[in-house]
Structure formats: structure tokens, C-alpha cells
Amino acid sequence: MGLLKTANMLVGYKAWSDELTFNSLKGVSDEELYKERMSYFKSIVYTLNHIYVIDDIFKAHLSNGTHSYTFRNTETCPTLDELWSKQQVMNAWYIEFVANLSKKELKKKITFKYVGTGSGTMSVNEIILHIVNHGTYHRGFVSDMMYQIPAEVPTNDLPVYLRDVHIEK
């Protein structure tokens, strides 16, 4: 699989994984969604919000725009429904962005400032890989918090996506 096909597959996987996660949380009470837990981002929704914020920061980098974040999360936490609406728009943006890339654009280097301190340079391909890995990493924390409720945790692993959704022809 070439770089472009892989990038397209990965953003599709991220959108699918996010959908499974958010859908599995719809029946969970607000008390459990916002309950402070032994986790860096303290709650299920605040952890999902962090994923969104990082997606938004890198969207700004990819589109030569700016963002207003001074932290890697927001001071206040949206509702699950508000966050899911925003995440769907974000995922659609990434899918469309990657679908319109050329192989040359995928390799383009982007220099940016990290939130906090320092600067970095990554290729578009590396940024795509980062947002997918980052989302997967933090959805793992969300799954752990769901087990603590206990709530049904979705099976949102890449092999399941490849088997059930992204069937190559």
C-alpha cells in the first residue's frame, strides 16, 4: 500500500474509531462521563476533548493557519454531544484534506510552534500518522475509564477496521 492509500486508510480508521467510542458513551450518565478519575485528563469527556484540541492544532498547521490554544486542552469541557458534533466535522476535514493530497504534498515539511515551548518540523504524512496515533493512545485511556464504570467498551482496533470496513478491492 502506497503512502497516499495508507494516509487515506488511517484518517478513515480514526473517524470510524471515534464514532464507535462516542456511540458507546451515549448511554453513560453525565456523572460517569465527567467523574474525576486517576488519569491525566481527569475524565472521559475531557480526555476526548484533548484529542479534539490536538486535531485542531495540527489542522491549523496543515492549513497554514493559526490557532488560539495556549494549552493542549480547553479550560472548560464541552458536553459529549457538543464534542461529538465538533469531532465529526474535524474528522471530515481530515478525510477531505488527505483525499486531495498528492504524493509530493504528503512529503512536504511543515514547521510550527508547539503549544508550550519550542518548534518542530514534520512532514504532512508524519502529522497524519501523529493525529491517528495520538487519538488511538488517548482512546485507550477512555476505554480504561469505561471499564471502571463498568461500561461496554468498543472494539476499535485497526485490524477490525481493516477486516470489517476498509476492505481493499
Image: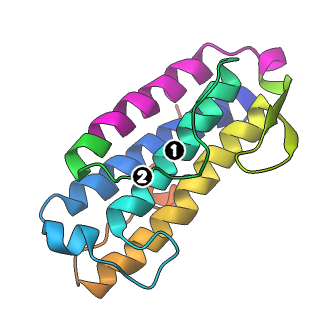
Tag 2–tag 1 contact (CB < 8 Å): yes
Q: Quadrant of residue 102?
A: top right
Is 128 situated left or right of 44 in this image? right
User: Residue 49: which numbered mark, if any?
Assistant: 2
Give the class, few, some or many, for how many residues have Cα within 10 Å of label 1's Cα (few <14, many ≥20): some
Secondary structure of the residue carrying numbered label 1: helix
Query: What's drawn in magenta, residue-wise?
Result: 84-105
Query: Relative to 69, is 45 above or below?
Result: below
**Left or right: where 90 falls relative to 62:** left
Mark 2: which secondary structure?
Answer: helix
The quadrant holding residue 6 is: top right
Left or right of 54: which side holds 79?
left
**Residue found 52% across the figure and 31% down from its top:** 169
Count of marks placed on residues: 2
Is any part of residue 166 visible from this angle?
Answer: no
Please indicate whether residue 83 sits to the left or right of residue 11 in the image: left
Horizontal and vertical percent position of residue 32: 21, 74
The residue to which callout 1 is attached is 53
